Image (cartoon, rainbow, N blue to C red):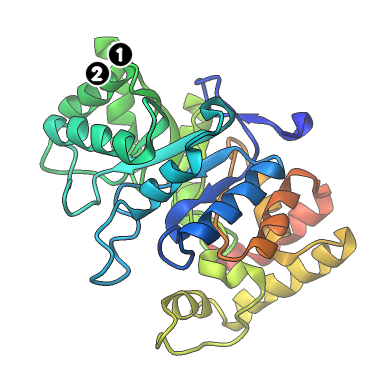
Amino acid sequence: MTTSATRVIGKSGIEIFPLAFGGNVFGWTADEQRSHELLDRFTEGGGNLIDTADSYSEWADDEHVGGESETIIGSWLRGRDRSSVVIATKVAKYSKRPGLSPANVAAAADESLQRLGTDYIDLYYAHEEDPNVPIEQTAQAFDDLVRAGKIRAIGVSNFSAESTEAWLKVSRDNGWAEPVAIQPHYNLVHRNDYEEHLAPLAARENLAVLPYWSLASGFLTGKYREPVEQGDSPRAGAASKYAVPAGLAVIDQLDEIAHAHQTSIATIALAWLLTKPQVVAPNASASRVDQVAGLLAVGEVELTADEVAALDQISTWGH
């Protein structure tokens, strides 16, 4: 790990390389062998944070039942030094383990541990809010996991600022372990939701921010420069919706800065996120081994103040 690039997940003390490798591709667009090769390349290059969820990749098709990503990570982990990697996974969205009731959280954590072949999870996220369960019950269930040594730190993903604050408050009132990280949808072409509502809370509470869709479903790699039909490529359809003049102007600016740094557009898009307060590791995935180097390069790129300002200005439409 590059020492100068290392970040810490909030108040947890957990040190990470400033990029979370997205495990959504494992067992979906990357089979087991390819997934192992991707993980090898990522960790050999200095990366250590692997992000997954119990539901990955249930969404893909009828043959995918969920749990594939965790199982593949577990098979890769066998025979390796567990302490050399930081594993984040999530509960709430898996159809077999939906929601955040205490019983479900406890059972889902045990099942994730079994699939991962480990006795602890470094960062355990509530994957989405559950309006049917009082926040006190969920907060206590996560605290129970911390006390049992099954998880090291708590995170929330897709939570509003209000719900995140409520979890923090009830945890403090009861002396329970508090969330230390949030995982919002945040990137150069989707800024408003995070910057207006969650960023002030993250700064006030020293919450680590680990954005997902950091590359806007691939749009911020520069690959999609015109709209395409959803068709056979859901990812392309999702990415190309940003291929409007304002979005393409962002790509042009990224291209210019990438050229100056002799790196990729994607690397610069990730580096921009890392200039924002509290952001410790954008989440990005790769299906090909040759794509991993561009992600890892974010640990070496330092944008100038002028470059950050230019990207801030050109992407204001993302508000």
Quadrant (top left/top right/bottom left/bottom right) for the N terminus: top right
Identify residue for label 2: 144
Q: Looking at the image, which residue is at 69% across and 43% down? A: 44
Q: Is residue 283 above or below residue 204?
A: below
Where on the picture, by quarter, is residue 118? top left
- Residue 91 in percent (x, y) is at 28, 42
Q: Is residue 314 above or below residue 208?
A: below
Cα separation, mark 1 vs mark 2, equals 5 Å
Where on the picture, by quarter, is residue 147? top left
**CB within 8 Å, label 1 to label 2:** yes
Q: What crowding class fits label 1: few (fewer than 14 Cα within 10 Å), some (14-19), or many (20 or more)?
A: few
In the image, is 244 to the left or to the right of 95? right
| Amino acid at circle 2 | Asp
Mark 1 element type: helix
- Residue 65 in percent (x, y) is at 24, 60
> Disc count in the image?
2
Mark 2 element type: helix
Residue 82 can be seen, yes or no: yes
Q: What crowding class fits label 2: few (fewer than 14 Cα within 10 Å), some (14-19), or many (20 or more)?
A: some
- Residue 311 in percent (x, y) is at 71, 60
Identify residue for label 1: 147
Q: Nearer the viewer, residue 288 or 228?
A: 288
Single out the residue that lies furthest toward the top: 175
